[in-house]
Image (spheres, grey):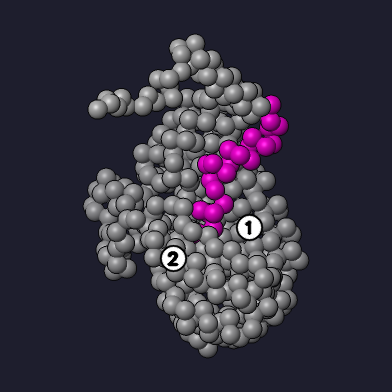
Amino acid sequence: MAHCEPKASASQQSPPRQQGNRAMDVAKDSQKSLVIAQRLPVEILIAVFEMIILPPRLTRVHLSRHRNADAETWISLPYICSQWYPIALSVLYASIEIRTYKQTLSLLRALQTYPHLRKLIKGLHLPMRVGVPCPLEVYRLFCQIIHLVDDLRELSATGVCGQPVFQYPGTFIQTDDKAAWTKSSLSLPIAPDRHQDLVYLELRGELTTLSVSLPPQLFSFQGLKQLTLANIALTERLNPGVTPKLPLLEAITFTNRNPILLLDDWLCAHPKLHTLRMYEARGPTIIPRLISSGKIKRMEMMHCVTYQWNRELISSWFNACTSLRELRVSDDIFLQNSDLVPINLEELRVEIARHWLDMTRWERYFERGPNLGRFILSAHPRRNRYKELGESVISYAKEHTPVVVFEPPNCNCSDNVRKSRSARFRTIPGNTIQDAIGSWNRAPECESE
């Protein structure tokens, strides 16, 4: 009987010299690739690094801002080669979101130790947490960071509530009189004449449950294009004849509380305004004039149904906004109101974050004969069943719409155990500074998470 020897692998069959030549060829190919990458224009390298660090897909799906889950990849970018170092460093520091007290302290120390980093930061974001105010220790550190940074373009921060009381012309005093709260105002954590080139500002009123007025300093940012007001209840209507306008304002966003009725006349006076976003925002009692003014071309309604948005209000809202061309809605809007969602749109985007929709919901919409330029279904939870159901919906949608896109999930935040709504609000700070900071570190950034 012949004895069968095991067949040698390709590497075992090749003589040592041939193996060395092959390894040399691989090394040369890798070197050529690196040389080609090094020759790319700076603008292309910046675009590539930005896609790696902060993919647009994640910023659309989440209400909060999420970096790429593969942190090791983008942290190592500056150290690949010396030519990439300054480019990657500028991208890494361009927009910073602070999530914990430790991160706040580390960033402050880095800016104090390495002053050359200050000019790289163009965006600073301190997220709001559900049910837990920002601890004053974190806020003080954040204010110091804002003061150190050279020239911000984007800022998300909490406004501190003060109680100015008119006593004599041009003078204000601090008082504890409850009647004075009707004249309270939020203050921005920005020194006068600093960061005048802001194009994005998110101002939050999380440290107060009182009705306030907007800080006069806000209206000095004449280059502002996007304004977000989160958890702010205003005291009075803004008069466009008295209150300065923001001539370049393109988008207004409301989160939680929704003061759109008090801002209605002022917003209608902005010539370039075309986008309205509402995230977990309460429904107004009447339809604002802004909706029927013909200005709003793009609208986003994310996780709003549980905030006093009934079918009658949603129907009146969409019927009044005849100028709407692009609509982004979350699953809760589509779940109960698919027969009310507009059908004549250039783009409809439906985000699946909490509830999957059975085929009857989709059939109810598409049987109305929608005229869509593009339909996008974005499924967030990382479950195989969601992906399969999404592909089924896409197959059905292609029968009614020429351009259909399905975006499967590419992040891992839905793998975490979701807390109930009541459990999230039971996160109450303790009596010590450490307890307050710990509660803030652990609290979610929005109710949809």
Query: Which percent across, then down, holds residue 347?
Result: 65, 69
Q: Which mark is residue 226?
A: 1
Q: Is 134 placed left or right of 328 in the picture?
A: left
- Quick check: marks 2 and 1 in contact, CB under 8 Å? no
Q: Give the residues drawn in magenta, as a range.
A: 39-61
Quadrant in which the C terminus is drawn:
bottom left
Of all residues, the one furthest to the right in this rendering is 271
Using the rendered view, name the quadrant where residue 104 is placed: top left
Which residue occupies the foreground of this view, 194 or 153?
153
Which residue occupies the foreground of this view, 62 or 28?
28
Q: Residue at x 67, y 54 (%)?
A: 224
Query: Which percent across, then down, holds residue 275?
Result: 65, 66
Kindly identify the amino acid type of the residue bearing the numbered disc 2: Glu
Kindly identify the amino acid type of the residue bearing the numbered disc 1: Gln
> Disc 2 designates what residue?
388
Q: Is 111 placed left or right of 86 in the picture?
A: left
